[in-house]
Amino acid sequence: MNSEWWKQSVVYQVYPKSFYDSNQDGSGDIRGIIEKLDYLKKLGIDVIWLNPLYQSPYVDNGYDISDYYQINPDFGTMADFDALLQEAHQRDIKIIMDLVVNHTSDQHEWFKKSQQVPKNKYRDYYIWKDPVEGHEPTNWGSSFGGSTWEFNEEIGQYYLHLFAKEQPDLNWENPEVRQEIYKMMRFWLDKGIDGFRMDVISLLSKKPDYPDGRVIQNRKLGTYYDGASNGPRVHEFLHEMYQEVLSHYDVLTVGETPNTNADQGVLYSDPTREELNMVFHFEHMHVDYGKYGKYSNASFKLTDLKKVLTEWQEKLYQKGWNSLYWNNHDQARVISRFGDDQEYRVTSGKMLATLLHFMQGTPYIYQGEEIGMTNVKFPELTDYQDLDVFNTYKELTEMHQLSHEFAMEAIHAKSRDNARTPMQWSEEKFAGFSKVNPWLAVNSNYPAINVEKALEDPNSLFYYYQKLIQLRKEYEIITTGRYQLLAADSEKIYYYTRETDDQILVVVCSFSNETEEFVLENYSDLATHSEAKLLSGNYLEASQVASEMILKPYEAVAYLFDKKGK
Ligand code: NOJ
């Protein structure tokens, strides 16, 4: 059962802990989200994705779940959650939840029992392995530093954790584990939620021979990707999940799929295969990786970005479906990363929004993106909260012997806390997020960048996003048109078209902070069509579409042509 409503939808991601604090304890909560639903309605989004709200010791901000059936009391109660669902549905907004089933918390009942001696059936709910020649079974390095294996003296075995040691991996080979997960999914779907974002779903099936991973330059440990991503049974598991659970509900499913290319993206999202609707890939998030991986402030090449986005647009066309994102709770803020967070903050933010929202797929907006929130530069390491920051600092300074300054620069550029600073609602103290000191400090630029200001300014980023969302509803071509990249070699201008039998949409985006001359190589073809209609532009005076265009710094325009005789 699937009506494909998610193809016309725009999703807004809420990171509950940082969205809005309704009870003044410094941490966002469910009632806070309810209070802001009208704001989201005004923006025009169709769906909210909620990061994990479940019971959790919070070692990895809720991605370590100790009870899938309970709401974490810091966020409120199940009654609050039911109220949120009802209030959202009343406004015609759907809600999707995070599904974190590659691993649980080490405080989950299953894992507690898994460690008991003598052994019981729960031992086989997780992945326990004997030492190999006195060592870890493989050389795999965890996402948060160190080995993926943790030794248990009493049992004499290691358990696997691809993330923190408090996040043991579930054993998906065990059919009973799968049934437990399906039961839990039905519980939430029967409550009326509208789908799931599935955490690291490409990692569910590990290669049975547990091969060592390749050791990448500057890494002591091998990556687990070789043995754990897109493993031999992952598609079988997801198809089973579809048959047993998802096919019985009209829902949106998006899988987070690290280490997945566009060909694999088709396998996950081709509707005839009955797995997922779409995936979040990471390939465009890797274009600015440096010598030490993600934690780098390396610049990126626009041609690399084009290559990745184009490949996904082309390969999934009429085969699968794309999800479109720049930001989420794990990524640096896009304006600081691919735009300009100073003079051209709003202009470059609009340009990036234009580039993404005219592509084929379902766009995701991460809280604060719609007002142009930027990266934060906390001066002290202790100002940060994310465990990944501390592990990275240690890795850079101890393992690689790099300076404190180098490590802090990398953290400023890429820390996940860049995305997690509290939502900036107003210029009141603590950005109007809370009346008390928040769990993570607010970005000091909140007096200038906040929702209240954005709503007062008709030219704000907020209203630009609002319009992009409306355009998607008005113009079918944004959902269906075929994508084509032009000027592939330009390092300054990203130019693509979308085309149907009746229309051509021309999207020109400048990544330059200077005025640029740009030749529209296919202008003679375009000129045979109707007058161009400006759908969107980020300057009050948009540059005319012409064979030679003069683009202002970070200018973006989208023009629509009706084909003659149509
Ligand atoms: C991906 C999530 O988005 C991230 O926040 C989390 O740390 C890991 N998966 C582990 O669950």
Image (spheres, rainbow, N blue to C red):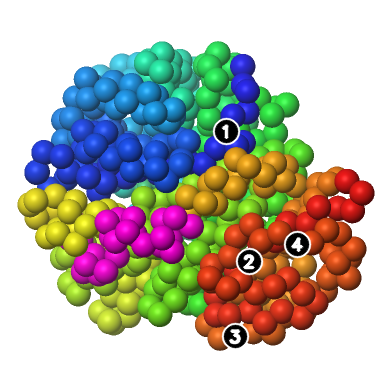
Residue at position x 12%, y 60% from top? 429
Residue 366 place in picture, x, y as percent: 41, 50
- N-terminal label among 3 and 1: 1
Label 1 to label 4, Cα distance in Å? 29 Å
Residue 75 place in picture, x, y as percent: 20, 34
Q: Tell me where the magenta segment starts and ends, as one range.
A: 440-464
- N-terminal label among 1 and 2: 1
> What residue is disc 4 on?
532
> What residue is disc 3 on?
515
Label 2 to label 3, Cα distance in Å? 14 Å
Give yes or no for residue 460 being in the magenta stretch: yes
- N-terminal label among 4 and 2: 4
- Answer few, some or many: residues within 10 Å of disc 4's Cα (few below 14, many 20 plus, some between 14 and 19): some
Residue 510 place in picture, x, y as percent: 61, 74
* Nearer mark to the viewer, of 1 and 4: 4
Q: Are marks 1 and 4 in contact (CB under 8 Å)?
A: no
Q: Is residue 58 left or right of residue 407?
A: left
Identity of the amino acid at label 2?
Answer: Val
Mark 2 falls on what kind of element? strand
From what the image shows, is residue 75 above or below residue 283?
above
Identity of the amino acid at label 4?
Answer: Ala
Mark 4 falls on what kind of element? loop
